Image: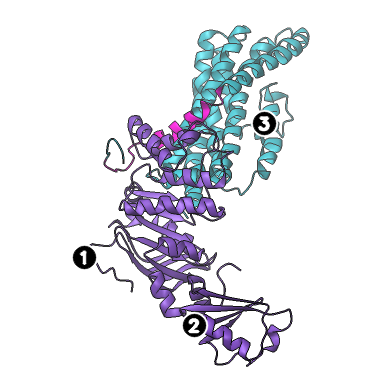
Chain colours: A purple, B cyan
Amino acid sequence: MLAVTSQTTPLIHASALLKRFGDFTAVDGIDFDVAPGEAFGFLGPNGAGKTSTMRMIGAVSPRTGGELRVLGMDPDDDGPAIRARLGVVPQSDTLDMELTVQENLWIYARYFDLPYSVARTRTAELLEFVQLNDRAKDEVEPLSGGMKRRLTIARGLINEPDLMLLDEPTTGLDPQARHLLWDRLYRLKQRGVTLVLTTHYMDEAEQLCDRLVVMDKARIVAHGSPRQLIDQYATREVLELRFPVGVQETLDGKLDGIAERVEHLPDRLLLYTSDGDAAASAVHGRGLQPESVLVRRSTLEDVFLRLTGRRLIE
Amino acid sequence: MTARSVTPHITRWPALRVYEHHVLVYRRTWRGSLFTSFLNPVLFLAAMGLGLGSLVDANNPTGVGGTAYLTFLAPGLLAATAMQTAAFESTYPIMAGLRWMKTYDAMVTTPITSRGVVLGQVLWVTTRIFLVTSVFSLVMIAFGAVSVPGALIALPFAVATGLAFAAPLQAFAATQRNDTRFTAIFRFGITPLFIFSGTFFPISQLPDLIEPMAWLTPLFHGVGLTRGAALGTLQPLLAVVHLGVLGLFIGLGVALSFVTFRRKLIA
């Protein structure tokens, strides 16, 4: 369904991909292709099946059904050969707290059978790349969340992977740490590393992904570039209205005709329209007095709301 | 980006790379653990072997098991020490690797397989048991509790005894979500075995009903081997039976570990 337009064979091909844990269906027959060099995202709330999908791609979780090819190989048959060419940044850091920063990278290099000399050279380069070179000999434990995340990314790059899998790379980080990480990931993409990432942050998907799929309840509910998805499932602008407590419930029908669509959230109303300022004037023109008025551009959050009727992070 | 390129390939000896990890971690802690390895046998042999032993020997002109209490006790303690080292190394560190730090999860995202993780762990615990029992043997020799050749023959038997505990325990540890049951294992398993498996007194002293139960425990067979080797009284046929039982525990434990580690890591 998500055909790659270029002539190259996809790095990842999945069709009717299925994962069950007992009676629970984590991934319910999804299809997607990832082309070399692109940044591809899985966007969705917690429990949508993103991590299960990533683990199947990473050849650490056998699929229950469907087809899956990673780097042209079947993870069921060639797990170690696939993993030799992957860089993995798991959702929770799996760093070794008993080792120093550089030892974490050295030993990880050894898992790929890299000679010591290569392990040491690459470690020095990668610590520079993620701006941790001055912490090389320090313990891992006292590092900040952002630093640990950067170290995990450096670790994932030690084998010069063709494909980087990042499961929620910036979850739990402060804005400054996130922007630094995004910058490093963007540089990787510039170097031609294929990135596959999951996120439940809209801004992250918009920043990093060339293409993405929106997942909800184990299925793909939409796919395209961030821009395409916004064009298709939202309007150009959104008018956010917040009313005094108790007023929002009395507005039935009073906003009809002002916007293409109105979403009622518990704390505010979202009016989807091509011209937010005009809609705001229309609201005031009807004698309504919202406590606050905000006009903004549509985001993937609006896309998700439209597709599922729910917000991404509840 | 890098000085030299290496063609990506499947790691040839995954278990050795996992072993390397354990060595790297141990490099940071070996001093403390070596000290404990010395202190334990010194304290035990001094207090039980010499202190208690002088009372025992005074009341037993023919000795315990035909020998002075110190020489009876020391090889039994050697096997028991192997058991205790193995039990510790195969419970909490496994929990750390699979749950607390997930260092094993990190390994299997590389060409390392879950089988490699298991075999690397077995290699490492073998090394740990060997180190601790070697130190113990040196102390035994210093106390005059065993001859040098006797200690050399007893040592591999002690390592086998430890492995007979390590392999099944690590298989079990991989099935646990937290460490609450480990305490029970030490309290109701390891400690009673330590006391009742012939380390401190011959099991013929046990009530007749309980005596056969000792035969089912690996420590009884381990003590039989180390004591027989140290005293030079080991009967070949009995040695084969003892080794067979230990081998069974090791083989089954490793086979089960392959299953339980895989179930946890590759899901």
Q: Nearer the viewer, residue B4 or B253?
A: B4
Mark 3 = which residue? Answer: B193
Task: Nearest to the eye among marks 2 and 3: give it.
Answer: 2
Q: State the image coordinates of residue B156 (x, y, percent, origin top left).
A: 49, 21
Q: Residues within 10 Å of mark 2 (few under 14, many from 20)?
A: some
Task: Nearest to the eye among marks 1 and 2: give it.
Answer: 2
The chain to which mark 2 is attached is A
Q: Amino acid at mark 1?
A: Gln
Residue name at image x 72 percent, y 34 percent: B209
Secondary structure type for disc 3: helix
> In which quadrant of the rendered image does the N terminus of chain B lie?
top left
Distance of label 1 from label 2 (alpha carbons): 40 Å
From where the camera sits, is residue A262 visible? Answer: no
Mark 2 = which residue? Answer: A275
Q: Nearer the viewer, residue B139 or A200?
A: A200
Residue name at image x 36 percent, y 64 percent: A210
Magenta residues, as a range?
Answer: B7-30
Secondary structure type for disc 2: loop
Q: Earlier in the sequence, mark 1 or mark 2?
A: 1
The chain to which mark 3 is attached is B
Q: Nearer the viewer, residue A262 or B113?
A: A262
Secondary structure type for disc 1: loop
Residue name at image x 61 percent, y 18 percent: B35
* Contact, mark 2 vs mark 3 (Cβ under 8 Å): no
Res A32 quadrant in image: bottom left
Q: Amino acid at mark 3?
A: Leu
* Contact, mark 1 vs mark 3 (Cβ under 8 Å): no
The chain to which mark 1 is attached is A
Q: State the image coordinates of residue B247 (x, y, percent, origin top left).
A: 49, 33
Mark 1 = which residue? Answer: A7
